[in-house]
Each structure stands twice: as C-alpha cells, then as structure tokens.
Amino acid sequence: MKKSIKILAIGNSFSIDAMEYLWHILRAGGVEEIVLGDLFIGGCPVSLHAQNIKDDAHTYIYLKNTDGVWRETPEASLTDGLLDEDWDIVTLQQASHDSGLPETYAPQDEVLDYIKANRPHARIYWHMTWAYQGDSTHPAFPRYGCDQTAMYQAILTAVQTEVLTRPAYAGILPVGTVIQNLRATPLGDTLTRDGFHLSLDFGRYAAALTWASVLCDVDPDAVDWLPSECTHMKEHLSEIRNAVKCAISKPFC
C-alpha cells in the first residue's frame, strides 16, 4: 500500500468522470498524502494534446485536489500542469469518439516523449475508456454501427495494438472493461448519465475505484466510503468491487 501519491491526468471530460471520487476513495483505502491533477479540454484527442505541446497552447482547464476539493485554474498549458508537481503518475487517454480507431493513436508518441522529458521519473498509464450506452445518441456512435459491443471490442483492440506495444507505459487503467463488466450485472446498461459520460453514482465510483486499485494497490473490498448523496449504492458495492477485480485480472475479456 502506497502512503502518498501524486497523479496527473492529461485528458478530457472522461478523466473528470474517472477522478471525481478518486481522492476520497484513496483516503478510504489508506493513502495518507494525495495530490491529484487533471488537465482537460472537453472531447480532447491525443492529436490535440500533441499540437498543444507544439503551440504551448494555454487552453486547458487545470483541476487540482489536495484535500478532497477540486479547484480550477483556467487557461493553463500542458507544461503548467506537468511542472506544477513532481508527479508519481501521469495518465493519458484517447477521446471517446476515437477510442476504437487505432489509426488515431499515433500522436500519442509525441505526448509520451514530452512527458518523459519533463517528468522522467513518472510512471505513465493509459486510461482505457468505455463504450457508449446502447441507446446513446452521441454523434460518433455510428462509427461503431451504433453497437456497444462492437465499440467495446474496437477499444480493446486499439489498446492492445497501439498502447501495449509502447514500452513507455507502465500499465493500463481498464475502466472500459469495468463498465462493461457492470453492464452484465443487475445494474444493466445504466452507467452513464447521457449515453456516454459516466453516471454520477455507480459509473464514476467504479472508475475511481479502478484507478485506486491499479495505481495504489488499494483493495476494493477495503473501501466502504460512499458519496453522501449515493447511499443507495451500498447494496451494489459487491458488484462494483467484483467488476473492478475481474477487469484488473482480465482487462481484455
């Protein structure tokens, strides 16, 4: 169990979903000193992160959490976030609409090189995001035939061919697999709030528990914390924990 951790996400709205409850879950899991950062632009693909590095673009919102409360700094650059702390972990992800398209992943190499140049001791993880809800009206869903299973399989393939082949990564955060596992439980296909962003209860909680388990060796069974407005989740905690443990042991099933 790690007693202190500093984690920076380079992402988009899906990194906000995954990190919303992360500070509290880490603390409940026994981590004592926690610093979280999230550099995000809504819908941002890795190609735009790469371009922003070249342009030194100050177009990110930088969210930071050191005490359980997220605070926002507008008009930040990727460099601002990277140099703000001596990060232990930096995460990267693809925009959801491109997540199952391997040909869109190539610009990640420029971002990886920049991370390593500025934070050479940080471990880099890939945040594997989730397929859309079956009835999603997201305009990019037709790229996958408006088929959740097809999108999920495409994401798995892209991560296997375009992420696992990069030695710069220390590992993956299999949130997409966790969400798909939960869809096979009595919770069903109800884990998003708009067809693609995670629900404010089960979806976000499962994602954060995945991050805590992978990055800090937090035992999912040891975490009982729930958001104050989500006490209804208690009866489903075992399903969430099992989905996380299964995804970590078999991320591409």
Image (spheres, rainbow, N blue to C red):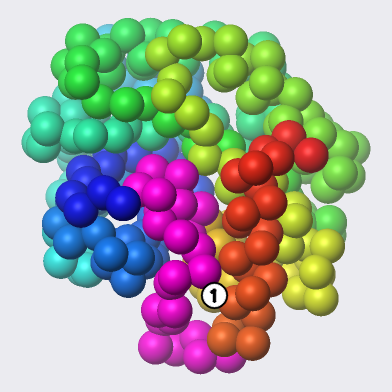
Residue 126 pos. (x, y %) = 49, 30
Residue 43 pos. (x, y %) = 50, 40
Residue 202 pos. (x, y %) = 59, 71
Residue 221: in magenta span: yes
What amino acid is at disc 1? Answer: Asp
Q: Residue at x 76, y 74 (%)?
A: 187
Q: Is residue 172 left or right of residue 187?
A: left
Residue 54: in magenta span: no
For the residue pair 199 and 183, the one nearer the viewer reads as 183
Res 202 seen here = yes
Give SS at disc 1: loop
Residue reaching furthest to the front? 1
Res 57 seen here = no
Q: Residue at x 78, y 29 (%)?
A: 154
Q: Is residue 55 left or right of residue 245?
A: left
Q: Residue at x 43, y 72 (%)?
A: 223
For the residue pair 135 and 232, the one nearer the viewer reads as 232
The residue to which callout 1 is attached is 201
Seen in the picture, residue 89 relative to 190 is either above or below; the reply is above
Seen in the picture, residue 219 relative to 128 is either above or below; the reply is below
Residue 108 pos. (x, y %) = 46, 15
For the residue pair 108 and 185, the one nearer the viewer reads as 185
Please identify the quadrant where the C terminus is shown.
top right
Seen in the picture, residue 220 relative to 159 is either above or below; the reply is below
For the residue pair 146 and 175, the one nearer the viewer reads as 175
The quarter holding residue 251 reads top right
* Magenta-drawn segment: 209-232
Q: Residue at x 68, y 14 (%)?
A: 161
